[in-house]
Amino acid sequence: MRILIIKLSAFGDMVQAIPAFQSVRRHYPDAQIDLFTAPLFADFANQLKIGKLKIFDNVIKHQRFAYHRLGQIKKIRQMIKGQYDQVIDLQCVTRTANYFYFCCPNPPLWAGVAKYATISYKRRFLENLKPYQRHQLLLNALDIPYQFGTDNAWVKELPQKILSPLKNNKKYVLLVAGSSPKHPEKCWKIENYAKIANILLAHNITPVLIGAGAEQGIAKKIIQLCPKICNLVGKTSLQDIAVLAKNAYYGVGNDTGAMHLIAQMGTKCLVLFAGKNNPDLCKPPYSHCLFIQVQDLTTAELTVDMVLQQLTQAGVIANRNE
């Protein structure tokens, strides 16, 4: 059996697909299972395992292209047609549905949103489901049992260069202050994160700031307001963040991929949502993951006290009135 799973982006969606990835491998331990994904997530995907068994035999890097580039269309066709017995499209968008048509006539068994695929669901229907519900629906239609939750045995120890700033701190809280530059309204104010960090330090808890290298500007501003914060922005791989999350005391951050990974590792966390996104559909589907939603995180709508109240109720910090 040769299986191709398509999951291109984004990182939060990739993290939420881990149970689906593991379910496929669990059902087909001897199959060739390949992943078609964005280059940014290739190294991360290569680390995923169930116990000692790698999930993916090959991770193929996907490069976006315009549909008038016939050479790229031919390349996709040659990569899939005749090479796989089954294609599972977990991305479920128009672009990946078109890959089905690139393989016609006589495409492989295909599950996704392509109209004439072997197993086809309407995209609008799937968009009203939580990610894990979409994945469960597709896998069950293929007679693949879906197992909720993940085997995190693939998470390894942190490298010493990252571990050393934390070696004397048993309790640390991860702070995720960045988000997509396309959605500035999804970023809580920098000074608010600095205030939270200083309060954590006052409770002998180390605040650890994580994020992509492009968020160094955010990190510098927070450091100016909280010099003792542990800054790991731009210093970790996605795998490192998984290990940090697995050992963290708590996590607080904007609606971004890192928060999904923190929740996936079983760590209690608080996600700050903005705008019209429905947290019931978008947030990590775990009871240990809480959320607060406001219209715009850049305004004074969400106060530091509101977040501190959640941290107090979660037992992260002591009640300030006691």
Image: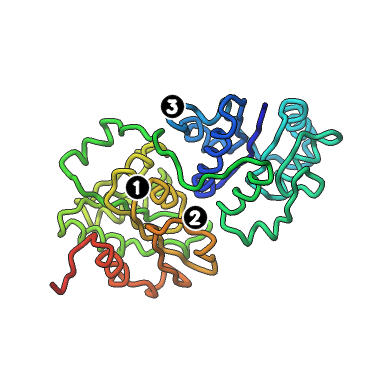
Mark 1 lies on a secondary structure that is loop
Task: Tell me: 79 left or right of 167.
Answer: right
Name the mark nearer the viewer: 1 or 3: 3
Residue 162 placement (x, y as % from top left): 28, 36
Q: Mark 2 or mark 3, which is nearer the start of the sequence? A: 3
The residue positioned farthest toward the left in the image shown: 322
Q: Residue at x 37, y 56 (%)?
A: 177
Name the mark nearer the viewer: 1 or 2: 1
Q: Quadrant of the N terminus?
A: top right
Say if 21 sits above or below 174 in the image: above
In the picture of the structure, the residue carrying the numbered disc 3 is: 52
Q: Mark 2 or mark 1, which is nearer the start of the sequence? A: 2
Q: Mark 3 or mark 1, which is nearer the start of the sequence? A: 3
Please name the amino acid that badge 1 sits on.
Answer: Ile
Q: Quadrant of the C terminus?
A: bottom left
Label 1 – label 2 distance at C-alpha: 16 Å
Label 1 – label 3 distance at C-alpha: 28 Å
